[in-house]
Amino acid sequence: MISQGIIFRDEYILMVKQFVQRGDIVWNFPGGGIEEGETPEQAMVREVQEETGYWTEAIEQLSISSDKYSFLAKIVSGELYLDTSLPENDDLLDAAWVHINDMEKFDPFTLPIRELVVNRFKMKLNEC
């Protein structure tokens, strides 16, 4: 099981560019494996920090599938920094804020969560 964080800043989503098991290089939400003794939420916080430099806090669990937990999260502290010296980051090439409409950056596997979050974002804008 993996746990990932979906973090917004205005109209941008925090993403990491990485090699994936199927051999592609894709933009993905920061996240990774849940270690023994960790909750999915704790794993999300740890993974986001390792991959992006940001400490986060889960706002709500967006979804759970057979292999993945997805949390809407907010930044508590830190700054964007990809530490490539960490062995667990050897599959990462970049970390960046990606515009929600930059569709070519989204891998087909990230699109369902992107759509869920974008729809919520649009609802919030309409409430203002």
Image (tube, rainbow, N blue to C red):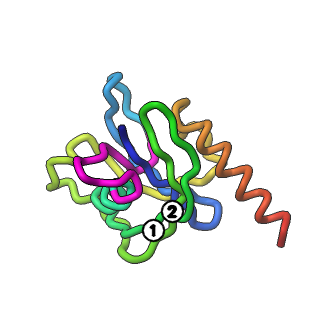
Residue 87 horizontal/vertical position (percent):
14, 48
Amino acid type at circle 2 is Ala
Q: Is residue 53 magenta?
A: no
Q: Quadrant of the C terminus?
A: bottom right
Q: Is residue 23 above or below residue 26?
A: above
For mark 1, what is the residue?
A: 57
Residue 122 horizontal/vertical position (percent):
77, 57
Q: Residue at x 28, y 58 (%)?
A: 50
Q: Residue at x 85, y 63 (%)?
A: 126
What residue span does the magenta drawing correspond to?
Answer: 27-42
Q: Is residue 30 above or below residue 76?
A: above
Residue 29 horizontal/vertical position (percent):
45, 47
Determine whether the residue tagged by mark 1 lies in a helix, strand or loop: strand
Q: Residue at x 39, y 51 (%)?
A: 40
Determine whether the residue tagged by mark 2 lies in a helix, strand or loop: strand
Residue 61 horizontal/vertical position (percent):
54, 53
For mark 2, what is the residue?
A: 73
* Comes first in the chain, label 2 or label 1: 1
> From this viewpoint, which residue is outermost toward the front?
37
Q: Is residue 93 above or below residue 39?
A: above
Q: Residue at x 46, y 71 (%)?
A: 75
